[in-house]
Image: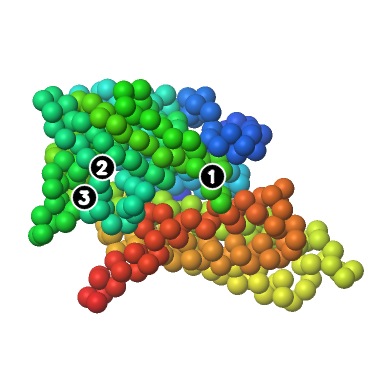
Amino acid sequence: MRRTIYGADHEIFGATVRKFFEAEVVPQFAAWEERGAPPQEFYRRAGDLGIPGLQIPEEYGGGGQQSFLFNAIVTEEAFRACVGLGSLRVHMDIVLPYLMHYATDQQKQRWLPGAARGELMTAIAMTEPSTGSDLAGIRTTATREGDSYLLNGAKTFVTGGANASLILVVARTSAPTPQDRRGGLSIVVVEKGMPGFTVGQNLKKLGLKAQDTTELFFDNVEVPVDNLLGEEGRAFEYLMHNLAQERLTIGVAAIASARTAVSLTVEYVKQRDVFGKRLSTFQNTKFVLAGCAAKLDAGQAVIDQSLRALDAGELTVPDAAKAKLFTTEVQGVILDECLQLFGGYGYMLDYPISRLYADARVTRIYGGTSEVIKTIIAKDLGL
């Protein structure tokens, strides 16, 4: 189905990003997977093209784009090149909106210019070793001591944690109440190099091997009160504000990944001989890929409609939840069926389909597990 969401400017931008990824990422990506993260130089080179700061206001050195469509193009082009750049996407799509919405002008002047240039990468730390989707269980504390907070605790599964210069840490600044279990949570911004702040080793994962995912440890870290983001006790409210965009960006990636998988598989079956015939000539092959194509177009329609709603300020948390649930489930089905058509070769890491397959599994977990997402949709139904 023909997509109508992008115009001429988007196509030109997409071609520029595609060329950049082909030249700067694809040849190095295997080494990045071995290393466990892209080098800092990659982000600075992306900054030369204005990629990390697309939506940062021009007065702070960014591109000043109001539309999320350009961010979506970056994600789609990354998957077209069959590379995962999750840390960059977290910086652009998840963390920067918090800084742009809740930072003071002074904080913006300190942080946003470097973020736009790719010199100052960001991450967000919510999950703890014993706390996942239920933010009310957060145990990391930020205790006010004069002009500073003393931060103590640990975070895990922090995407971009190794390369980040700024970490938005969700911590408890006061005790919850029976009426509001999520009350008392605040966001403090920890800067790389603060005494007592330690970045653990990259965690070994099933997929996303070029994406630095770390544990973070805080031992009496003195965080200036000036690094409080927004107001004390309102972290949960702030996190909900960007939740729709966060879940939509996962859906964008899911469908882009599935599209690349179908493209790779169609190309492969046209070349592979089985029992003296091309694999593409078997009815099963045709039926499987036809089903994948139909699912893919349905998922793309959901994403494009959600992107329009987001730009119009109309994308609700339940609708974003539906988009994430549907597209990540579709992604899982398509990746499994495509890998099956590759046979034994699909299980080999030399073939990109295996990387896509491994990377896809987490999309039904992060950003809200499918089970949590379903409870949000059910609540919206009045159940």
Which mark lies nearer to you, 1 or 3?
Answer: 1
Q: What amino acid is found at the position of numbered circle 2 in the picture?
A: Thr
**Residue at 39 percent of width and 61 percent of height:** 369
Q: Nearer the viewer, residue 310 or 332?
A: 332
- Number of the label disc, if any, that sits on residue 140: 2
Picture coordinates of residue 137 (x, y %)? 25, 53
Closer to the N terminus: mark 1 or mark 3? Answer: 1
Q: Nearer the viewer, residue 191 or 221?
A: 221
Question: What kind of element bears circle 2?
Answer: loop
**Residue at 53 percent of width and 35 percent of height:** 37
Marks 2/3: CA–CA distance: 15 Å
Which mark lies nearer to you, 2 or 3?
Answer: 2
- Number of the label disc, if any, that sits on residue 236: 3
Q: Is residue 373 left or right of residue 36?
A: left
According to the picture, the residue beneath numbered tag 1 turns out to be 204
Quarter location, residue 308: bottom left
Q: Is residue 295 visible?
A: yes
Picture coordinates of residue 342 (x, y %)? 72, 61
